[in-house]
Amino acid sequence: TDLRPLDILSEVVPAGRLAHGMRVFQVQGVHGFQLTTSRPRALGFPASRLFIHCDCFPEEFSIIVTLRVLSIPAKRNEYVFTLMAEENPSVLVGLRYAPNKLHFIFWSQERASGWQTHVTFPNVSLSDNQWHTLILAVSGQSFSLTVDCSVPKDVVAETPFPASLSVKRASFYLGNRRRRKGMFTGLLRQLVLLPGADATPRICTAMNFKVATLSVPTVLQDLPAKPTSNEVLKYPYETDTKVTLGSRPPCTKQEKAQFWFNASQRGLYLCNGSAWISMLEVKQRLDYVEEYQNLVTNSETMGVEVFTIPEVGLFTATANRYTPPGSAIYKWTDGKFVPYQNIPTYQAQSWKYFTIGKKIFLAVANFEQNDRGQEFSVIYKWSHRKEKFITYQRITTHSARDWEAFVIEGEAFLAVVNHRKGNNHNIDSVIYRWNPRTGLFETNQTIPTSGAYDWEFFTIGPYSFLAVANTFNGTSTKIYSHIYIWLSGSFQLFQSILTFGAADWEVFRIGDRVFLAVANSHSYDSGMPAPSNFYAINSSIYELNITAQMFVKFQDLLTYSALDWEFFSVGDDSFLVVANSFDGFTFSVNSIIYRWQGYEGFVAAHHLPTVGCRDWEAFHTAEGSYLLYSSAKEPLSKVLKLKTT
């Protein structure tokens, strides 16, 4: 086999000729085969076409599969592929999927009669309507499964894979075991056998791990650049796609997935079964920013959160400094935010909106004690009957600054930043896990932090990260902030970055590039001479370096006691806006919108007059795009409208 990849899938479709019952579908921009044949043997070919120089299956190998699995009944099994001898109904080698399980099957002949061995990988959930790439590496008694380049699942079996498994007069069968029962109902894009090696290092190099490629049949790759004649481009298989020209045609279930091209407006539309959805639109460009609404708040506002409740509307929650009157929720009505609900809070710092299933929550981070001397932050739940938020769970916190909500492997978490306890800034912040049985959040993990201000959760491929902005350790703001990675059921330290009074992390993506921006608020060290200005200080943007497996500095930007970054896009353009709060002399400081300029990095594009700017939120409505900023120095926040050309 000379250790070359053996493309099983391509052998079923030589020269792009599809076997009976095979169709090509495109889902999420990726092509795959659907198998609908009533003659399973038609999806087979002799093993001798792959094993030219040897009639034995490799002793050590990897199997690489890219597939999209449909939801199947609990007791049903579906075969991805099998290798079977012509005269024997038993499976020599096979891969079978069941709900939340993957079975690797092989025939062992250590006994005279021989028997089948099943190696089972539990908790493999693929039925999420997404593409997934599986790498099964086999060597002796060791079996390792990697899903989307995540942490491998390892199994050591009692029975080793045979050192000499004959494939004489055997055939590979795609998606079946020579019977219609157990036929694979999903989509297959890649099925490759790589002898003698663990394919994981070869596969796990791209950013899109779910469709990582070693070898894919030509028919599933990109279309040719131009037709060979005057005919419209065609796939080498049947297609039901239809494009209608002229005036607007009807869009009903009968026309679903059909296109309409509006020649007069150069618009391409897709019917979703009830309405035409624009597929091509003129990309807008940001021209200038104008003041749109002065939002009078209950008191100075430390943070804002914009969110949408399905079938109810668009809202913003302001975290206000004083109680009474507490904090407020505003609803977007007739193109403006209007008061909707007041909630008692105690020097609120921030709000976090999140959902668990059909439940809708809003958590507030309280910085001070309540009237009874108790220090709680509170989770509120949306009541569909009352159409307002009601108290759901109180959690003990210590000068809480921020909440972050996220989901890992189907489980919901909520992390709080504890800023200080009394005068001690070096305390634990806490990650809570949702308990579906009790319907409450329970402590899952504590992480030491130093005067922390902010959590930022993000994912890269299959990996989950949580970054904390550490601000002050009691003597200095020049301290390390940390990035943690989720491994084996908990967050573990991934990287430490030196920051200066870090108040915020903002993760964002431009194309395939991943960036992480920190807002540095001030430089203070009790053991060092005072700088000329504590607050005029660089904030930094870091970029993920895949090769080094760490974030490296990309750009420094001069900021003035920066407290927040917000990333947003207009058309094809990307922007970052910084919340500059104090320049050492006045709180009336320009906050700046930076435009992404590729090789030049981020370049200042718009200077926005702000007063004690604390937080930015970008949001969109049918009328346009907006920025909302909160002021920590006056009871007035502002909505700015982005004017485009």
Image: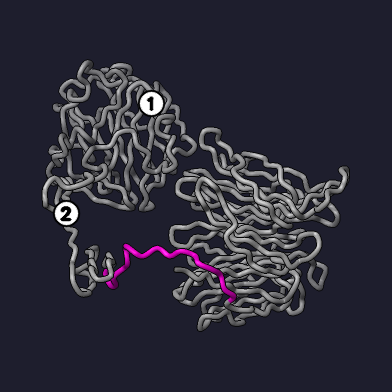
Q: Please state the extent of the stretch shown in magenta in the rendering.
A: 273-291
Q: Is residue 277 magenta?
A: yes
Give the percent coordinates (x, y) of residue 641: 54, 72
Of 19 and 229, nearer the camera is: 229
Query: Which numbered circle lies on residue 239?
Result: 2
Query: Which numbered circle lies on residue 138?
Result: 1
Of 399 and 141, nearer the camera is: 399
Task: Name which residue lies at 77% across and 53% down.
Answer: 522
Give how far apart the Cα atoms at labels 1 and 2 are.
39 Å
Q: As drawn, is 536 to the left or to the right of 228?
A: right
Query: Which numbered circle lies on residue 332?
Result: none
Of 242 and 433, nearer the camera is: 242
Q: As drawn, is 169 to the left or to the right of 285?
A: left
Q: Is residue 118 magenta?
A: no
Whether residue 436 can be seen here: no
Give the foreground label among 1 and 2.
Answer: 2
Task: Name which residue lies at 73% across and 73% down.
Answer: 300
**How many neighbours does mark 2 have within 10 angstroms: few (below 14), some (14-19), or many (20 or more)?**
few
Task: Name which residue lies at 23% across and 19% down.
Answer: 166
Give the percent coordinates (x, y) of residue 465: 57, 46
